[in-house]
Image (tube, rainbow, N blue to C red):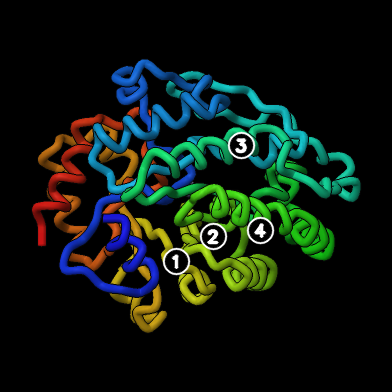
Amino acid sequence: MKGVIMDMLRGGETDRAVCVSLSGCQGMTPVEIQEKTGVFWPKAHQDPDLMTDLVMKSMELTGFENVRVPFDACVEPEALGAEVKWGDEKTDPYITKYPYTENPLELEIPDDITTLGRIPVIIECISQLDKELSDVVIGSTVMGPITLVGELIGTENLLRKTLTDPKLIRDLVERVKPVTLELISLYSDAGSDVVQVIEPSCSNDMIPPNTYKDIAHPIHKEIAEKTDTPTILHICGQIDEIIPEIAGAGYNAITIHSGINPIKTKKQTKNNLKILGDISPDSQANATPKKVEQEVKKAIQRGIDFIEPYDGVVSTAKLKNLQTMTKTTKQTQ
Ligand SMILES: [Zn+2]
């Protein structure tokens, strides 16, 4: 199946949709899977062996056609000095103190990032997965530069300064951009077949569409241009007004929420990329399997290429619903 998925990401077509969990700010290891594996967050965020065991078990139990690490979105900020609370089996790690709120111009990136924070953990986990899995797509997550600046100077600060001091934000984004590029390269070398760039701070709810076009889009384009590994651009939340830019940034795939028409999006990019989506966190956690089945069928009819839990698998997702996603996708032509 790995060959089929990689071929799709590079522009090929198949006769059926595929169910994966390649994108989203959430990982793919909800509480129910932690309980069945006997491996729990937050330890699994910090130990490459536990991370490997848990994500492989998730793939086996759910039927998703891939694995993806890390499970949280704090790796880069933590590595660059943010203080992190580790959460519990239900709660993702989260940042409690941004390191450069008061002094953004002191933000400097060390020459060698490979030993910082949990970066070695993620690299080791990807290497282990690469040894264990010969025919499974290994996905990984890196934080995009705009969101990373927000996680270092404070998200509110980022949003305010994109309006009041765009020059500063451009400067800071340029400073952190090498981190995103370097991690894509390190994870790819370790065995990651596809890397998603997450940019939750780039949705229309966070920064105005014109700011996206002015500051973020050129950087996103540059990252795609400089990367050989297939990449996915994930911006969660409202993206309606920046779809042409996102779709034209040169990524192999993008994620969309259920309010966006995938057929129209594909037309906007002359069928040049694949669409991932869009089973909501609410459906994953609260819907009946019958309702999930209907949503999967609807997503396939709407032309979604990769059926996915939207924004990753929420920690409260029911295993039965995830299994229904993969089963229904397989059975639907
Ligand atoms: Zn997201």
Q: Residues within 10 Å of mark 3 (few under 14, many from 20)?
A: many
State the quadrant of the C terminus.
bottom left
Name the residue type under label 4.
Leu
SS class of the residue under badge 2? loop
Q: CA distance from mark 2 to mark 4?
A: 24 Å
Q: Is residue 110 above or below residue 318?
A: below
- Label placed on residue 240: 1
Residue furthest to the bottom? 270
Residue 230 is situated, as x and y percent measured from the top left of the image, at: 47, 64
- Label placed on residue 204: 2
Q: CA distance from mark 3 to mark 1?
A: 27 Å
- Label placed on residue 74: 3
First in sequence, mark 1 or 2: give its number: 2
- Say whether marks 1 and 2 touch (CB < 8 Å): yes
First in sequence, mark 3 or 4: give its number: 3
- Label placed on residue 181: 4
Name the residue type under label 1.
Asp
First in sequence, mark 3 or 1: give its number: 3
Name the residue type under label 2.
Asn
Q: Residue at x 78, y 63 (%)?
A: 170
Q: CA distance from mark 3 to mark 2?
A: 22 Å
SS class of the residue under badge 4? helix
Nearest to the eye among marks 1 and 4: give it. Answer: 4
Residue 182 is situated, as x and y percent measured from the top left of the image, at: 68, 54
Q: Residues within 10 Å of mark 1 (few under 14, many from 20)?
A: some
SS class of the residue under badge 3? loop
First in sequence, mark 2 or 4: give its number: 4
